[in-house]
Amino acid sequence: MRAAAIQIIEKLTAAGHTALLAGGCVRDMLLGREPKDYDVATSARPEEVVRLFPGAKTVGAHFGVVVVRAGEHDFIEVATFRSDGSYSDGRRPDSVTFSTPEMDAQRRDFTVNGLFFDPLAGKVIDFVGGEWDLRLGLLRAIGVARDRFEEDRLRLMRCVRFATVLGFDIEHATWESVCGLAEKIKSVSIERIRDEFIKIMLHENRVRGFDLLVNSGLMRHILPEILALQGCEQPPQFHPEGDVFVHTRLMLSLLPPKVSLPLVMSVLLHDIAKPATQTRDADTGRIRFNGHDKLGAEMTGEIMRRMKFPNDVIEPAMVAVEHHMTFMEVKKMRTATLKRMLSRPTIDDELALHRVDCLGSNGKLDNYEFLLAKREEFASAPLVPPRLINGADLIQLGWHAGPALGRLLNAIQTLQLDGQLTTKDEALAWVRAHAPVADVFEEGAEA
Ligand code: ATP
Ligand code: MG
């Protein structure tokens, strides 16, 4: 990728244009990180870029962006130096004019994102003080912070995201502006907000990002339900750490660096229904949250649909929230129930959720370790093996198709998973002894 970007720069330079690496890739190179992609900024106009690189495609004609193919699956954006005109929609400039590298640096969001690098001369070109801010680990808006966030409100989220993933402090005036303008995030599309939120939550510094979202006021407009956890008291014998907010934040901090999106969302949302379900026993004053798992799963679905997460992220997060309380009872479960639980496709994330749920409260991992041991123990045979008998076998014995037959098949499978039935003959004998049907009336079936 880098070699391809440099080749493009060489070709543009040979044709008499200025061409530089720009933005995020320069920042990452100077930090010694692998850039995600390489962007080229040039004095060449889009038509000229297309002429020099046959097959290149203009993607943002309006913004002067051309995409040049750099390999089978790799593309490099080549953008003409530009200045942004006025902003009236809080997201995109009304117009752009092609300009100089210096002006192009001024339109970018943060000083550390406003650097250029001339790979042919091996020189950093810095019009905005970004090199120093990189060394200081400081995220600073270019120009007048307040104006920059007013122009494009997505920058409010980008500020929290870059502070999180770079581990940078936020310069004072920049942070004051984010806090002062947090409410304006409402004018940005939820998809863009969600994408930044995901990058924050997937990064290992996610707790810092969480704190920045809460403290800036952005969380109030993205996920206000999280703030309702503040001050939601819990029984101290189970939750010595404090209220539901403290517990949830602590769990975030205990996650491994790499997590799946459903896992981190289930951590954030597993107790989201506690405020709504909290009761106190009249005599003892004991706090309870009956049904917070079921209601929590529903709320998780609602919130994640509101944030337009895809279904394949929403569903596993809901499953994890719905079942998170059953982990407290695993030692009392029958084998069949354990096997069904351990065969859920979501079980790895559910175990990880349970682990931080314990570590973020009483610290006891006995149920977690019990489940890992059971999983080992069951590992030799498939957790849920093929059924010993099927519906057709039961119909032969005189059963009618219908819900009762389905329930009987499940009961037989439970005995199989428990190890009480091991062969087809045993299963058939059990049916003859315990469920000699024929006289069961099924709605819709012939008598
Ligand atoms: P990464 O790709 O690692 O997420 P990046 O810094 O490359 O980070 P991009 O969104 O790819 O971010 O944008 C590339 C560059 O374009 C940025 O470094 C910045 O200079 C500029 N830029 C992107 N979005 C904005 C914005 N909303 N406002 C101002 N400048 C922006
Ligand atoms: Mg980028």
Image (tube, rainbow, N blue to C red):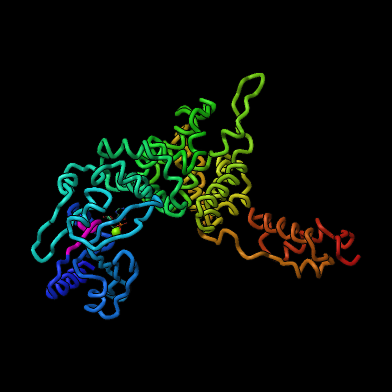
* Extreme-top residue of the structure: 283
The x and y percentages for residue 16 are 12, 72
Total numbered badges shown on the rendered structure: 0
The x and y percentages for residue 116 are 17, 58
* Extreme-bottom residue of the structure: 54
* Residue 377 in view here: no
* Extreme-left residue of the structure: 121
Compared with 80, 316 (above or below) is: above
* Side (left or right) of 89 relative to 172: right
Specify the quarter for ligand 1: bottom left
The x and y percentages for residue 447 are 91, 65
315 falls in the magenta region: no
Q: Which residues are magenta?
A: 20-26
Instruction: Specify the quadrant of the image occupied by residue 48.
Output: bottom left
| Residue under the image location 25 percent in, 67 percent down | 78
| Residue under the image location 84 percent in, 67 percent down | 398
| Residue under the image location 23 percent in, 45 percent down | 143
Query: Closest to the observer: 327 or 376?
Result: 327
The x and y percentages for residue 350 are 51, 48
